[in-house]
Amino acid sequence: MSADVLAIVFQHVGWLDQPTLAFAVPSVCRRWRDVCRSHVLGVDISLKMVKEIQSEEEEMAPVFVRDYLWCTAVVATVLAIVHRFRSVRSFALKLHSQIPAVGVDVVASRCPNLTSLSLAKCSNVTNAGLAKLVASCPNLTTLNLNRCISVTDAGFATLAAGCPNLTSLNLGGCCNLTDAGLKKLAAGCPNLTSLDLMECKNVADEGIGMVAAGCPKLTALNLWGCANVTDAGLAKLAAGCPNLTSLNLNTCPRRHRLWAMMRLRQVARA
């Protein structure tokens, strides 16, 4: 049986769940491992690590020792997965905020074919880590950086320069994003159709205006909690994004929400 056929079998056999495909199958023999490494492209790996006490010994250990053991286990798991699937296209790290930056570095260096990545709530992801990711994975189309609070405008500028094919970007809770960073993203990622800016409290009308001018394909925008966005920014948004079908303005001042609905209706009728 050829490698191509074997890969198809792996991906379509119903009882092969993701943990089995990630760990058990590549361990059977060298050929199966090589097939997984080079041919299995459609696996959606979602690694969710929860920090729990495993035994009485660990419970009695100092906190820093438990943290070290837990972080070491996370990195070992990430290494094991990317070693088996170097051609993987989708990876989700739904992890405790203490995930070490080296875990992200491993994914970036070993998975150059990534098109979808979630680093939601990985607060230890920094500008430097994001730069490595961008350099290694230029084909990203979907990226979730929700609550990656250590990334600043400099990191977002690097992202914009290196990932022009992004269509979906989640920056919810990225408290260090300002209009300056949003301007770079709007200019560098013109294909964005979905943008989440929930609780990006430093984003204001200028940044939204840049999004309206640079991302005409936008269909979904989340401005929940963006209190600095006013009628002026929404006017630019309505004029520049005629394809917008989903706009979340919850917690924004009521008058802005009402004005936005009326203005978008006018644009839709025109």
Image (tube, helix red, strand yellow):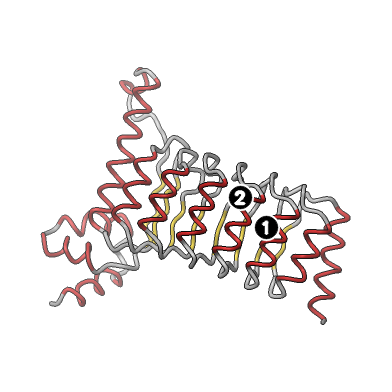
The structure residue drawn at horizontal position 37% and vertical position 62%, both measured from the top left corner, is 114
- Residue 111 percent location from the top left of the image: 32, 57
Q: Position of residue 246 (x, y in %)?
A: 69, 66
- Most foreground residue, 147 or 139: 139
Residue neighbourhood size for the residue with mark 2, other residues' Cα within 10 Å, grouped as few (<14), some (14–19), many (≥20): many
Query: Could you say which disc has been placed on residue 206 in the image?
Result: none
Say which of 196 and 25 sits in front.
Answer: 196
Indicate the position of residue 79 as horizontal and vertical percent values: 27, 47
* Residue at the left extreme, as displayed: 30
SS of the residue under disc 2 = loop
Q: CA distance from mark 2 to mark 1?
A: 8 Å
Give the farthest residue toward the bottom.
Answer: 270
Looking at numbered disc 2 in the image, what kind of residue is underneath it?
A: Gly
Q: Which residue is mark 2?
A: 172
The residue carrying pointer 1 sits among few (fewer than 14), some (14 to 19) or many (20 or more) residues within 10 Å by Cα, namely many
Q: Looking at the image, how many numbered discs can be counted on the residues?
A: 2
Quarter containing the C terminus? bottom right
Image marks 2 and 1: residues in contact by CB distance under 8 Å: yes
Question: What element does badge 1 sit on?
Answer: strand
Residue matched to label 1:
222
**In the picture provided, is 84 more to the left or to the right than 111?**
left
Query: Quadrant location of the N terminus?
Result: bottom left
Q: Residue at x 65, y 70 (%)?
A: 219
Q: Which residue: 39% across, 56% down?
A: 91
The earlier-in-sequence mark between 2 and 1 is 2
Along the line of sight, which residue is nearer the eye, 49 or 249?
249
Q: Answer above or below: position of 58 versus 1.
A: above
In the image, residue 167 sits, relative to residue 207, either above or below, namely below
Please name the amino acid that badge 1 sits on: Asn
Which quadrant would residue 35 be assigned to in this image? Answer: bottom left
